[in-house]
Amino acid sequence: MNDVAELTVEEREATLGGIGTARKRKEDARFIRGQGNFVDDVKLPGMVFGDFVRSPHAHAKIISIDTSAALAVPGIAAVVTAKDLEPLGLHWMPTLAGDVAAVLADKKVHFQNQEVAFVVGVDRYAVADGILAVEVEYEALPVLVDPKKALDDDAPILREDVVEKDSVGQGPRRHPNHIFTWEVGDADATEAAFASAAVTVKEDILYPRSHPSPIETCGCVASMDATNGVLTVYGTFQAPHVIRTVVSLITGLAESKIRIISPDVGGGFGNKVGAYPGYICAAAGSIVTGLPVKWIESRMDNLSTTAFARDYHMTGELAADANGKITAVRATVLADHGAFNTHAQPSKWPAGFFNIVTGSYDIPVGHVKVDGVFTNKAPGGVAYRCSFRVTEAAYLIERLIDALAQKIGIDKAEIRFRNFVQPEQFPYHSSLGWEYDSGDYPTALKKALAAVDYDGLRKEQAEKAARGELMGIGIATFTEIVGAGPTRNCDIVGLGMFDSCEIRVHPTGSAIVRLGTKSTGQGHETTFGQIVATEIGLPSEDIVVEEGDTDTAPYGLGTYGSRSTPVAGAACAVAARKIRAKAQKIAAHLLEVGEDDLEWEVDRFKVKGLPERAATMKEIAMAAYSNIPEGMEHGLETTSYYDPPNFTYPFGAYICVVDVDRFTGEIKVRRFYALDDCGTRINPMVIEGQVHGGLTEAFAIAMGQELLFDEMGNILGATLQDYFIPTAVETPEWETDFTVTPSPHHPIGAKGVGESPNVGGVPAFTNAVVDAFAQHGVTHMPMPHTTWRVWQTIDELGLNK
Amino acid sequence: MDKIAVKMTVNGNAVEELVEPRMLLIHFLREQLNLTGPHIGCETSHCGACTVDLDGRSVKSCTIFTCQADGGEVLTIEGLKGADGGLHPLQEGFMQEHGLQCGFCTPGMITRAHRLLQENPNPSEAEIRVGISGNLCRCTGYQNIVKAVRYAAERMNAQQEAAE
């Protein structure tokens, strides 16, 4: 209504700091000053500490637990065992996958470091003394480590608690150590395609057990207020609302009397999705002692007990014609889930979205069969920047297509062009049941090849090969499936996997935005504010984004599986558009014109044809509380619960160049180029940061991470001394690039990016390493590609002579 | 367990406290002095989240006893400030170059980088990478952290030159 001409449209747009701007992060201000508020920073009056007595055995009967000496240790307030939890019904807990898991070992232990008793005391030091004083007598049982032996007739039976059960939540099972069989696709048609194929390839490919290992371990502070019966739990939760529901289901407390707060979370990567014994025991400890109880995992506990990742033993096959056009894919998988079926993913998907194994390729038919089994190892399986087994599937197909290229003798880029789903085929229906929303794979790979001078690299490689030198070029053209998900096929403990956003615009034109997700470093406080800024025309600087407190945030399913932007980001845009729709009615009232006479421009509604007559969003916000049309309610706020119509399918083209020292086996990553297409880009700076981090995790997995066990089930190397986390010295320099193919069904066209670099990065590394040896007939090398292992390959091939 | 008296300077303030002889410096700082900037990420001195400055050297405060710091001078992230009392150039650099994501390793990383720039005011990228290799980060891939340290080095050198 005034001053409409003072700034240009572009200037006003820039003032918003909306979608597409590389805005600096709001959250940084506290972290750079050391003023973050992580769970171990939470201090409540009277707070005591709790920690576990853990099993040294991987499989053993518990004969007795004597807590008397521990209770005599100065400062010890309580020692809780399964027997104490049993009357409360808390000694076992339901898992997100439909199984049950022991909170404290009940009669036997199923994996090394399993929780046996919970010792509560005045501080960490007293508790450490108390733990040493608890005497547990075990009777060792035969241990099952190798998942390939789990279904043998004479295999030791692990889960006596469910031995009579036909199902542990994910379909029929055929052996006491069997969890599920999951099959998808057309077995007969696939077999027929293989029988008539000109060329077939088959590889046994292990994606080893690894661990996300965020620098902050898991932990919580539980406080039961006996006066009002309210249980408050601060904790490292990627999905606080789900945790509240699970705690309610386990304890029988009304959900309204449970408050879950995720304060700042120091990285999650899937490690912090599930419900762990520590949370339940801290709550039980608080009920028993009447004091707030803090439990913080040690690094060794973290690596050895909470949410490992992968452990997929895969056999993959491709059938193709003589030109390398793939005619069928087949995958047979043995999934090692450890002692309990606790993997955190949509209930109906026991092997997640592994049937995305057709990848970026137009494969007419396929068949996938996955068997899950119990072993004497820590439970888990879905974590680590992995969208529900997509990581394993992408690794398999990207490895197989390289093997196929080698067998036929065509270039590894060329075979991809011959098999890509073409841009005009979208929405593309894959033979294994997915509807890919959008993509342009050839353009992405062409751009990547040009950026690295692919032909030049191949020429250099050939020259080096002639001199006996080893250089490898790895390509990965992966497709992700993220944004779980449509509630018609995605739920967690029955809860539909929608997500939510509440927006309240205040009278003077600022806003608070609350979501059902929880940032663990992704920068939601910044990026979700950008979405809202663009949609409602208020500066992102004046928009506060809050997550993680179940008393204030709308219900949502949390942050994992790259779902925040596809689902909660969409809820943000939809909620903002509802705000704008109401604002339009108010603007029409203020400007005394019809709603249809108005058009939106950056931060205001203008009267069509009379651009000087306008109402800014700031003016409208004030009017919403002071001057509204007749019949309208006051206020300018709304909530959206967004149920995505489909998943989103980010994709990318990665190229990795390695040089291998043929005498030492040392691998040097000379170059890594990563092109990502995550649809509309909300904040390029944040996207690039996500890609850097994901690639570094992929590098760690491909080059050094593996959780190993000896034949007794002892976990080997569950410290950062042994478990590889790359430092700045080993980590390669990353080159990032992008194309933009918006998602047609997402309100702003965004797809999610957090996990892409892990999904695409790992096969790019292995493909590069194997490519260095391809000239010597090598078609696969198992991860991790440590210097020792690579040297063994070199030595076997006699290349160091 | 009998407690012993320790005296030290922490972020410029004189501190006198009683501690158990076995109390680690990180627990003393975090729990007794409420300086929760330095974090605990492992217990084997690998991750560096607990890095603080003790008598002009970077130390991992999870693997030294409080009594070993007796009489010493400790600097934590809370004590780091720019010349004008505002943000230190490193803090600015981490924000400008997107050198942090979850923020958990950040206090240790910045405190280490602060000492590195005292040791070598104009480090190359490779020297920065070696200089911060005792501090682990799982989110950023280090690339932007290296840029952040370079940013700070340039600022600090420019300030130094302006002062001369």
Image (cartoon, rainbow, N blue to C red):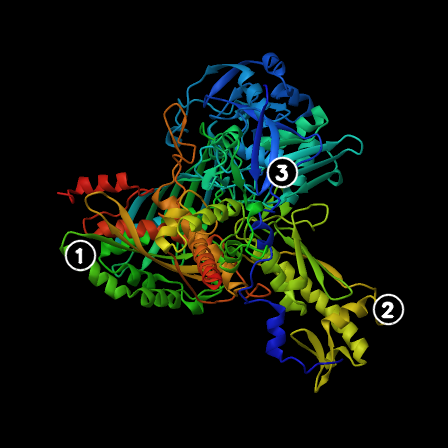
Q: Secondary structure at mark 2?
A: loop
Quadrant in which the C terminus of chain A appears: top left
Residues at marks 2 and 1 on the same chain: yes
Residue at the right extreme?
A630
Compared to A112, does A593 lie above or below? below
For disc 1, the marked residue is: A464
Please state the horizontal and vertical placement of residue A58, each as a whole percent of the image.
45, 23
The one of B150 and A309 positioned closer to us in this rendering:
B150
Amino acid at dot 2: Gly
- Left or right: residue A703 compared with residue A757: left
Q: Quadrant of residue A143?
A: top left
For disc 3, the marked residue is: B34
Q: What is the crowding at mark 2: few (fewer than 14 residues within 10 Å), some, or many (at least 20)? A: few
Q: What is the crowding at mark 1: few (fewer than 14 residues within 10 Å), some, or many (at least 20)? A: few
For disc 2, the marked residue is: A631
Q: Residue at x 61, y 73 (%)?
A: A13
The one of B12 and A644 positioned closer to us in this rendering:
B12
Q: Secondary structure at mark 1?
A: helix
Quadrant in which the N terminus of chain A appears: bottom right
Please state the horizontal and vertical placement of residue B131, each as a whole percent of the image.
39, 47
The disc numbered 2 marks a residue on which chain?
Answer: A
Q: Residue at x 81, y 80 (%)?
A: A592
- Which of the marked residues, 2 or 1, is nearer the chain's N terminus? 1
Compared to A130, does A204 lie above or below? below
Q: Quadrant of residue A72?
A: top right
Q: CA distance from mark 2 to mark 1?
A: 79 Å
The disc numbered 3 marks a residue on which chain?
Answer: B
| Mark 3 or 1: the one toward you | 3
Q: CA distance from mark 3 to mark 2?
A: 54 Å
Amino acid at dot 3: Asn
The disc numbered 1 marks a residue on which chain?
Answer: A
